[in-house]
């Protein structure tokens, strides 16, 4: 099984499969550590699904430790979860066991673990509504990060290639959960991105200028900023806040991160205006496929 390609070592991922934005914490810390762990997992013949489930179990244990007031232990367990979350995708590629089921499993279990962690944060801080708002904000942050990275690649002809469907009830079940929970978010985010681009453009622009404006709109700086709001970074920041006994600070930080969205969007629209010129327009890029590739982290 596999998760998102951003967790695989460069030697195992083609240029057309890499995420556009690079998450610095992931690149500098967790990916190298996970890469060092993979050979041991291969020798022990541990299947990738077991690593996915171990990463989910570790996250749930972190939530339990947090509920018991063991904040430092919870912080450490969250980093172990991130390490395992990065190891499962690398292991899948190294062992040649990449499947669509693994992508669904990783994304679905991450949602369950995130919900448990934020529910526990709401309890220990006495701020359940703040925790719920932060959970929804994080879910949106991760969805925007994923879709903007995919759109960046798609407009450049580098759409992510999904593993072949294997069939079976587990894949079907996990796929249905993904389609019910994540696919509507993906479609809304892509529709918003396309609508805002179309507002900047119109039917009279030349095809060349339309393509240039679309490429400018889906720019690398945007996806890099969003990538560094990803789950590996989020759990590291949460761990630091727990270590200094300030879990409520993390909830406010997540909510505050939403303020980056309008700034990034304004910048993207200005890039389009500079590229397309005044008084011209185009249809804009097609926002979406019916279902984007499962995310993974």
Image: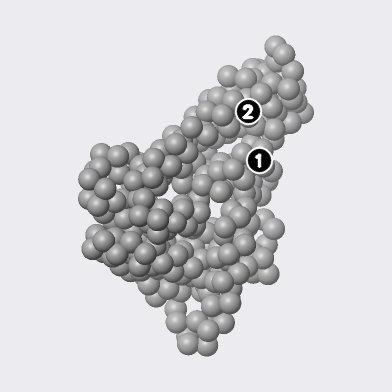
Q: To which residue does mark 2 refer?
A: 267
Where residue 139 sits, quadrant-wise, is top left
Q: Secondary structure at mark 2?
A: helix
Relative image position of residue 109 (x, y in whole percent): 36, 60
Question: Would you say residue 214 is visible in this rendering?
Answer: yes
Q: Is residue 234 above or below residue 5?
A: above
Q: Is residue 4 left or right of residue 245?
A: right
Question: Would you say residue 168 is visible in this rendering?
Answer: no
Q: Is residue 239 left or right of residue 285?
A: left
Identify the coloring: one colour
Q: At x 37% / y 72%, what residue is drawn?
A: 54
The circle drawn on residue 221 is: 1
Distance (Cα) linking label 1 and label 2:
10 Å
Badge 1: how crowded within 10 Å, few (<14), some, or many (20+)?
Answer: few
Q: Is residue 221 left or right of residue 56?
A: right
Please say if the residues under marks 1 and 2 sit with CB atoms less than 8 Å apart: yes
Q: At x 69% / y 21%, what residue is drawn?
A: 273
Q: Nearer the viewer, residue 248 or 270?
A: 248
Q: Nearer the viewer, residue 106 or 67?
A: 67
Relative image position of residue 225 (x, y in whole percent): 59, 43
């Amino acid at each position: 099984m596999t998760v998102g390609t951003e967790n695989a070592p460069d030697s195992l991922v083609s240029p057309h499969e890499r995420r556009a934005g690079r998450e610095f914490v992931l690149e500098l810390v967790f990916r190298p550590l996970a890469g060092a762990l993979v050979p041991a997992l291969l020798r022990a013949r541990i299947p990738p699904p077991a690593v996915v489930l171990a990463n989910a179990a570790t996250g749930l244990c972190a939530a339990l430790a947090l509920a018991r007031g063991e904040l430092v232990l919870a912080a450490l367990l969250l980093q172990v979860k991130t390490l395992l979350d990065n190891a499962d995708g690398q292991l899948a590629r190294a062992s040649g066991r990449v499947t669509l089921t693994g992508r669904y499993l990783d994304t679905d279990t991450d949602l369950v673990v995130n919900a448990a962690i934020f529910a526990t944060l709401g309890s220990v801080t006495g701020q359940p509504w703040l925790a719920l708002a932060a959970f929804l904000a994080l879910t949106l942050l991760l969805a925007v990060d994923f879709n903007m990275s995919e759109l960046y690649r798609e407009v450049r002809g580098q759409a992510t290639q999904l593993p072949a469907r294997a069939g079976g009830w587990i894949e079907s079940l996990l796929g249905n959960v993904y389609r019910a929970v994540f696919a509507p978010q993906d479609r809304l985010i892509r529709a918003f991105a396309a609508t805002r681009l179309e507002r900047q453009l119109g039917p009279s622009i030349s095809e060349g200028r339309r393509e240039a404006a679309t490429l400018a709109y889906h720019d690398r700086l945007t996806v890099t900023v969003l990538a560094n709001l990803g789950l590996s970074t989020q759990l590291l920041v949460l761990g630091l806040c727990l270590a200094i006994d300030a879990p409520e600070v993390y909830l406010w930080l997540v909510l505050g991160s939403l303020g980056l969205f309008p700034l990034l969007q304004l910048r993207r629209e200005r890039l389009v205006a500079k590229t397309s010129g005044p008084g011209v327009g185009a249809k804009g890029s097609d926002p979406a496929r019916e279902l984007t590739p499962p995310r993974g982290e």
